Image: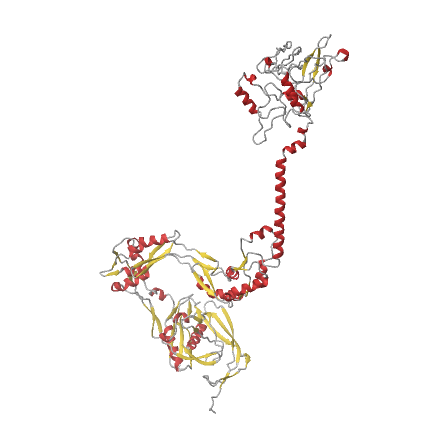
Amino acid sequence: MPEDHERPDRTEGGRDRRADEPTERIQFLTGDLSGSGAPSGGAAAEGTSESATGGRSDDDEAVDESRRSTKPGMTPPHVAGSPTGAAANTETGGTAPGSSTTGSSAGAASGTGDTGTAGAGTGNDAPAETATESTDFIPRVTEETTAVPFEGDTERTDTIPAVPESTRAVDSTAAATAYVPASPEHYNGNATAWFGHQQSQQAPYGQPQQAPYGQDQQFGTPPGYPQQPPFGTPGAEAGSPDDSVGSRFRRNLPNNRSLLRAGIAAGITIGVLALLYIGDLAFSSGQVPRGTTVAGVDVGGLDPSAAERKLRSRLDDSLSEPFRLKVGKATSSIEPQAAGLSMNWDATLDKAGSQPLNPITRLTSFFTTREVPPQSNVDREKLRAQLKQVRNDLHREPVEGTIRFEGAEPVPVFPVTGRNVDMKRAMDVVVRDWVGSQPVSLPYTKEDVRTDEAGVRRALEGVARPAVSGTVTVNGDGVQASLAPADVAAALRFEPNDSGGLDWHLDVPTARKVVKPQLKSTLKEGKSASFVFEDGKPTVEPSETGRGIDWKKTFEPLREKLTKSGSDSIDAVYKDIPAELTTEQAKKLGIKEKVSTFTTGGFSKDSGVNIKQVAQEVDGALVKPGETFSLNGHTGIRQKEQGYIASGIIKNGRPDEAVGGGISQFATTLYNASYLAGMKDVEHKAHSYYISRYPMGREATVFQRPDGTSVIDVKFKNVSDSGILIKTAWTPESVSVTFWGTKQYKVQSKTSDKTDVTEPEKVTVPADEECVATSGKKGFTVHNTRIRKDLESGEVTKDRQKTVYDPQPIVKCAKKKGEE
């Protein structure tokens, strides 16, 4: 086995070569953890037996040498018998033991503090081997002052600079020995503890277990033998193959191969998917996108012409049938053709779009559908007209809650919100949904109500039911009247309030109609003052005060009584009723003389009947100062039920008949009486054709519908300071109207000559129509001026009016066949 040579203490010139080096070589020696070895600061103990210090025999060295020779590039460990330096670790207070063979000695240097003591051992005088330095990290060495002895000299103190952590070099032998595990002896013979130490040297979980060089795979390094560090671990020699990039790559090769295989598989998958995508895109080019439906009909994957044929075959029949509309629960229907609706096939398929390029979209189309709304042609005016026709079927007016009665039984009416169809939005919805969607739900707005169901129920139980639970008795002067439950029910009124409930009251006029006839004997009607003529002059007939009942005060107690069940009793409250026109009021009106009068005649017998009837109705009418008199308003409806008959009129320039014909003559007479009395003209209209028995520009006509609605009227306002009493007189030949009061104005009338004369047209009436031949009359224009002078102030006013008369056509009757 090779021998370890002791390094000379000095070089040529007698100087220690190590003392000139900037950095002291630090060796890590195997130590005796049991505490045996050279004493700190003393001479090295002589090694008398390897076994005493945990050393090794010569046979062991031969085996170790054999093992080291199988690992190229590794520095053989120092064996027993070679001189080594020992370093004492002062932090732990122990001494690092050095081993030597018989006849050799080791020197030891001791140190204190953080700096260990470095010693140079002497043995054989062979040159020391040059140790291979390692770049692995070692514990930090701080800058210290170390005493190095020189032969024949005094002590010299050199400063050893601190070694940077990134560049510190460690002797490979020392690095190797740093991994020597403790032996059982180091644990005082405790094999279990030593085995645990061995287990702590195992590789982490998940990494392959590999024993370091020189260490038995099964049993580890024998006790006391230096242990070689594993490849690539701290302590390996710098630059060794096991510390290279290639070595690390080989150790990670299994992971790299897995990544390579995964990359190849991914590339193949992507390539296959790309080929499938391109093939699907080429195959479906020009087709409707897959998964497309129109009105529930699947047209995906078809070319446009085939898609149109399929849609027509499925939808054509339904497109000509009426479709239903719905608003809430109300429904109606309209016909597509009448509404101007038809299918636009081209626009519908264009709406479906073209083939998508997104691969995800194409993939999901195999499992999903996309509904394309049908596109329509529409005539919006026709559609609007159809929706207006069915609007009443779909519209609902809001219904407020209330209480109604069936006889004397109260019935609740719960509130209902209104529905108002939004016509503009409804048209858009119909155009969008009329194909396939049945019924089409139209948009609408709600019209809220003020009441709620709870409020109606409160009124039902709190008012309606108790109010009709008994009879109400009204006590008069010696007479009693009664309101039966049905009468009370008829008079009850309910109205919404702001709290969701119902307010109520008793309708006085309705209840009065029931009670008043029963108490008639206790009442006395009042009488207004009137005017009678004595010796041709008007006089006042006195008024009379009546006696009646204050109905409001009489029924007021029922407000509280009706909310309690059972019969009720109240007392009638009587009061005096003054006349509408008292004697004093009549006398103050100043009706004492004739103000104006006007007479017309020449009417037919039938017209005379109607003129007499209207004259009787107007006779005695009183117009107080500032009031306006209306002929239609005063008489009301003028039909057969009121005593009027059919008589001659002029219609469209031709003679005709109507109920009430001839009343225009009375209207003309009344108008002229007001004209001459100085009254203010409020409304009048001349006839379309001039009638010779009336003054030109001073005549009037009237007309009303059968229901009494006024169309053409005669109205005047009393602008005098006195009242006006209208008196009429009728004879079979004439009718007169006289105004009585206090004369205040002097009136003159001036009428211009005819101007703008127009010739009549000739009209031939067919033989099968009734015809009255006329000679016709010319049309013309005339102006009339009224000059009115106030008798008291002398003020004069002029009122000018223009009247245009149409020419009355010349009517000829066509002869029937066989007539000459």
- Judge by depth and name the residue closer to the eye, 33 or 534: 33
- The quadrant of the picture occupied by the N terminus is top right
Can you give x and y, in whole percent of width and height, for residue 581 in the image? 34, 65
Task: Tell me: residue 307, above or below residue 799.
Answer: above
- Residue 466: image x %, image y %? 28, 55
- Residue drawn at (27%, 63%) of the image: 523
Residue 204 in which image quadrant: top right
Identified at 59% across, 31% down, the residue is 208
Query: Can residue 344 be seen here?
Result: no
| Mark count | 0
Residue sticking out furthest to the left: 478
Q: Point out residue 808 in the picture as x, y percentages from the top left corner.
A: 50, 81
Relative placement, left or right, of 403 versus 678 is: left
Report x, y in % for residue 780. 53, 79
Image position of 160 (left or right of 819): right
Residue 469 to residue 582: above or below? above
Image side of residue 475 versus residue 353, left or right: left
Residue 799 appears left or right of 487: right
Farthest right residue?
13
Residue 795's place in the image compared with 474, above or below, is below
Nearest the viewer among 250 and 668 is 250
Viewer can see residue 748 = yes
Quadrant of residue 180 in the image? Answer: top right
Please state which of residues 359 and 345 is positioned toward the viewer in this rendering.
359
